[in-house]
Image (tube, helix red, strand yellow):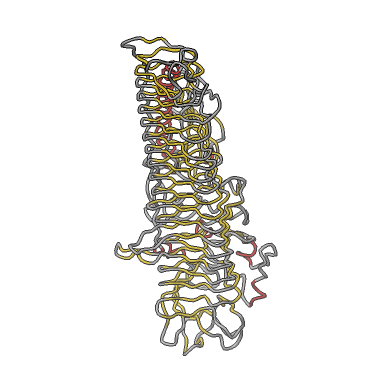
Amino acid sequence: MRQQHGAASLVLVLIAAIGLMALTARSLQAPAAAQKLQFTEHVATQAELNAWSGVSILSAAVANLTTPARLTPGPLTLAGVPDGIAVNYVGKVGSNLRFNVIGTSAGATSALAVVLRPFVGGGVTPSTPPNSYGTGQMYNGNTTLSGSVMYTGGGEPQNLSVLGGSLTLNGSVTGLNTVCATGDLSVSAAISANTLCSNGNILLEGAANAQRINAIGNVTLSGGAASSIGGIHSNGAVTLSGGSAYAGDVQATGSVAVTGGAASALNILTEGNINWTSTSSNAVSLSANGTVTYLPPSGDPVTDISAIGDVRVSAARNVYTQGTTTLTGNYGQGISGVLKSQGLLSGVQWGANGGARVASGTVGSITTPYPTGGVHVTVQNGYTVSVPRVVVPTVSTFTLTKPTVDAYTLRDQANLVFTGVDASGNPQVLARGIAGVPDGNYLIANNTTGPSKDWLCSTASGGNCSSTPLARVCKSYSDYNTCFSYSQGTWSMNGGNTALPLVLWFTGNLDVGTGRWVNTFIASGNITTSGQMVMFSPNYPAGSYTCQGVADDTNNLPALSAKGLSGSNYATQLCAGSPRLPTSAAVGNLSLVAGGIVNGVFSGGNITLGASSEVYGAILAGQYFSTGGATTVAGFTFAGKQGTGTGSNALGGSTKIVQNGGSQYYDPGTLPCTVNCSSGNAANNIIWVSPI
């Protein structure tokens, strides 16, 4: 994890899901194992309740902290914390605080990682707003990652969350930790992640690996999917079909099917039925409120089966059922341990000379004649078997506070606000906070006595300044080309070299052409970039470049003077001190912001990066975000789907999302608030919670 000025660049996502409970493996007595499981579930549930109670207490305490920066990692003592709850402070996550909360009960333990937003001094002000976006990658609306998408850097995998839509992963997607969607999640990519979660269904068709899958809907692993899934927790049905589909532990409210190829699982708990017809025989325990069909074609499995309904089995170790038992195995196959069947025992290899096998047990009745040489059971009329009912915990709904993008709330933080053009086509701007330039309204026009293009002046005649030019703000291909043009509501930063490292705000749409830009670009409409474009947020390069105009060789940025620009015309909200260095202002961590709200109606908000674009800074798209081939983004990316138009988020071609990099002043996890920036100290400060 990369740390700068006490802030970490770490991704976030809210996984409010209780983890899979431990399943009893290789039990010699299934009823005893199931009873033990019920007790384990009870104490585990109490431990989980303690952990969540601890989160609530901690949230209220952090909401009233006055000096959160003075917290030191380690155990915390909080007033009002009952027995069975422990809290440890881990450290900073961006501008937020991470804790581990541990709940205990009767030897059971439940641990939750929680990230909270600090409210300093009982409230915040617009000048020190909370980080309402967090860090990571967050997209609203249907989202597709295709081609080759790589999340890299920072020492830890990144989290990806999709709200209000489905998530589709195709091709090759690497470097992810936790991937969650409020809609369906479909994976046909070579993906490796710690956790996959969905409020809908999850479908895995590619070579996907995950430690845990949580779904409110159905879960399907098909084809050659999922060579390794640690655990599945579903409030729907679970299907493992064909190929090498594999899961360690499965908990499902609906039925579970393990069919085709060598699909397999170790432990299954379901409130429905189990239908196992694959060639694998590696199950350890199968428990169902309905029927169980377990038909491995060969071998002598060490499988324990517990069912309230009927059981059809070719081979197992122990079987406990309140229904009937049907042995379907080949000659010599059957039950190697104990059978306790409340109903009728029958089989395929049956009759006096049949080859069915039961080592020992008791049944309510039996089909006669039966192979007495292999079936050793006691028939007891009215025999009853106690089989505990399976209760699968509810999968918690994945939720995450949705921030709001509004370019207009950042207008006052801009150095140049582009409002329109005059009759001669000269850009009309409001200038603020530019050293050497008094705040006020200006035109961008030609300087008739020096390098000609893109100077600030109070008045102009035609395309030329008629008052003294105050500062040159941009250098295009040459002294005879302008950086700025405007047509039918769209501004264009024409391909060229660079502009002063300022925050630029545009009324309408913006197209950023080729060049090496060190700016924050904010537009009330949509933003597109041309291919071969490189962009740095002002805090990303060396501080001496942004604040003094000194060359930054690491990022291939020549001195501003070499472009005919002056380092003395710096942004006063971004730079201070002697020598001048960045203030780490949150707006300086942004590269692109699109979309605005007027009279309660949102418009614009689409950000589209052209092929071979490189953006080193955070991206906030109020509507949708898309990338082309060979695209690199360093920092947090967000898409809000705040408008009413149709569309989706699409990361395609070859896209790389980078966590690390940038100067010591750059913190992509600290972003300016755009809506409700004075939210007070109410305990609504939970950013995300995840089981450990």
**As displayed, is residue 10 above or below residue 437?**
above
Residue in front for this viewpoint, 236 or 514: 236
* Residue 174, percent from left and from top: 57, 50
Q: Is residue 120 visible?
A: no
Residue in front for this viewpoint, 204 or 478: 204
**As displayed, is residue 15 above or below residue 562?**
above
On the picture, is 180 further left or further right than 571? left
Q: Is residue 216 visible?
A: yes
Q: Residue at x 64, y 68 (%)?
A: 549
Residue with the most extreme bottom position:
462
* Residue 127, percent from left and from top: 45, 55
Q: Quadrant of residue 272?
A: top left
**As displayed, is residue 418 above or below residue 102?**
below
Residue in front for this viewpoint, 345 or 121: 345
* Residue 76, percent from left and from top: 51, 30
Residue in front for this viewpoint, 157 or 574: 157
Residue with the most extreme left position:
599
Q: Quadrant of residue 379?
A: top left
Residue with the most extreme front position:
353
* Residue 87, percent from left and from top: 49, 30
Count up the numbered dots: 0
Q: Residue at x 46, y 76 (%)?
A: 491
Quadrant of the frame with the N terminus: top right
